[in-house]
Amino acid sequence: MTQPFLKIEGLKRQFPQAGQPNPDPVFEDVHFGIERGQFVCVLGHSGCGKTTILNILAGLDEATAGHVIMDGREVRGPSLDRGVVFQSHALMPWLSALKNVEFAVRSRHPEWTREQVRAHAVKYLEMVHLGHAIDKKPAELSGGMKQRVGIARAFSIEPKMLLLDEPFGALDALTRGSIQSELIGIVEATKQTVFMITHDVDEAILLADRIVLMTNGPRAKIAEIVVNPMPRPRDRETLHQQPEFYPLRNHLVDFLVKRSRAFAPGADWDPKNPPLVYPGAPARAAA
Amino acid sequence: MTRNKPWLAPLLSVLFFALFVGVWYLATSTTAAPVAGPAVDPEYAALLGAEAATGGQSAMPGPGEVAAKIWEHVLDPFYDRGTNDKGLGIQIGYSIARVLAGYLLAALVAIPLGFLIGMSPLVYKALDPFIQILKPISPLAWMPLALYTIKDSGISAIFVIFICSLWPMLVNTAFGVASVRREWLNVARTLEVKPIRRAFLVILPAAAPTILTGMRISIGIAWLVIVAAEMLVGGTGIGYFVWNEWNNLSITNIITAILLIGLVGMLLDHLLAWVARAISWRE
């Protein structure tokens, strides 16, 4: 059996609490894999430990138990192999958009000349349509533009894997839509493997090939992994006209409002092999 | 209202100044009223010297005399007629040189040490009791100890400036470094940025506004302390000048020096404020 590109095994995270030697873990027994080039979203309510899982993948946090293997190597600490787009963009306010990206490029390629670094950074800023604003400081950019710089910074180091922590959570719907489209474009162009956290059902359907559904914490688990039946690249304008869209969407919403709270695993539910489900697949067959 | 009339505040300032000068003029001119007959016995005056000969007139000068004296100093700020008679420019120059020497030495110690304290909670805990005790000590209390160990009054004054500038810079640097936003450090970690590069390109710019606030407090304190320190050590400097003129009972010179001290203090503060603006960032 071949190993997936990224493999998460038996992950568990407890946060120390005063006076409790064995506090409830936020999540436990989390197993799943991501194939190269796949776009995977984790969907779940606040408090289920989505961000913690992402931080462990990034190497910024350590699991209490279990491990993460990427490309045959165990993840230990942060690495340039994994680019992160932070929820709060995390741009350095004293640097212009260009310098923020250049900082990352120079970290990846310390041997490059000034011109090489600049050209590379400009290329990625143009990919997110910020070519006109490269000399602006973050304070002069709108929320959407800041997040675009964050995305350009993460892509510019050409990581093996990209981790996005609810990058569009703070944006208005219109801005979110256009950045999602840009993200699809870059991901298609670079064949990037992406792991993204969201609590937005439509965002997950638009972007993800696989949607990992997590139950509510504490002791959150992966209930199931939903396979998106709609082929890539998905277009936000025609997506909802496809026959699978509503069955898939209903399935996800249903999970979030009901089953995530009262998840009762069946006898055949195996945390090491969370079931793959194909909502909407019959719809295509019927159509 | 003030938005439409930008000249209103300066006009009021001029008005207040005129009012102040007027009151000052009236207060000092009343005692100069002519008195019948010789106020002082000429023999007594001869014994006591020139001051007594002015009779009942106060040694407190009027605004006119002070203005004349200031003009005199402006025309010739750098004369040097021996130990106790140097131009105001020379005296203030000595003071500025001492302040800058002590201040820069303090910055050289405080900023790296503050960095270390801010980065390491262990070092912070270990050094905290010392800082707590040393910080509230009046810098002048160190003077005898400095004079005894250094044996040079000029260097002792610099040491006093050093010790009083040290604490605000140290505490602010440590605080600024310790409170660098976690997310920027995480960015640096995910980019595998080496410690030196992280210190100079992430932590230093992030903490720079806080460090500059400390530096601005320090230069203010140093400028307050230098006058007192020079009064103690003597020889040269604006503080010594003030004390020397007190011994000469030349109030005009003292007032001139006071104004100059204020002016230079303001310039130093503005200089630091300008640097602070240049390195500050907005989110």
Image: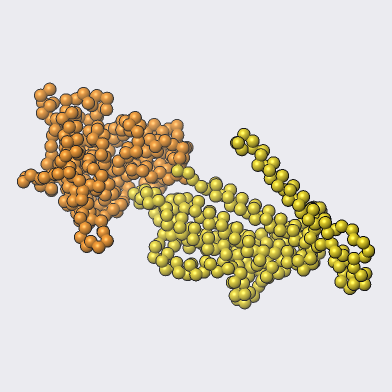
Is B35 located above or below residue B11 in the figure? below
Chain orange in the figure, letter: A
Name the foreground residue: A177 vs B132: B132
Find residue A39 and report its horizontal and vertical position in percent: 23, 38
Name the foreground residue: A143 vs B2: B2
Residue A243 picture quarter: top left
* Figure quadrant of the C terminus of chain B: top left
Find residue A171 and report its horizontal and vertical position in percent: 35, 36
Name the foreground residue: B126 vs A83: B126
The chosen color scheme is by chain
Residue A43 picture quarter: top left
Find residue B26 and report its horizontal and vertical position in percent: 79, 53
Residue A180 picture quarter: top left
Left or right? Give the position of B273 relative to B13.
left
Q: Which residue is located at x 23 percent, y 43 percent?
A: A45
Outermost residue, bottom side: B148
* Figure quadrant of the N terminus of chain B: top right
Q: Which residue is located at x 25 percent, y 47 percent?
A: A47
Q: Colour of chain B?
A: yellow
Total of numbered circles in the picture? 0
Outermost residue, left side: A267
Outermost residue, front side: B36
Name the foreground residue: A152 vs A121: A152
Find residue B191 and report its horizontal and vertical position in percent: 36, 48
Left or right? Give the position of A266 relative to B256.
left
Q: Which residue is located at x 71 percent, y 55 percent?
A: B259
Is B93 located above or below residue B274 in the figure? below
Q: Is residue B75 visible?
A: no
Left or right? Give the position of B229 relative to A173.
right
Q: Is residue B131 visible?
A: yes
Q: Which residue is located at x 35 percent, y 32 percent?
A: A175
Left or right? Give the position of A240 relative to B112.
left
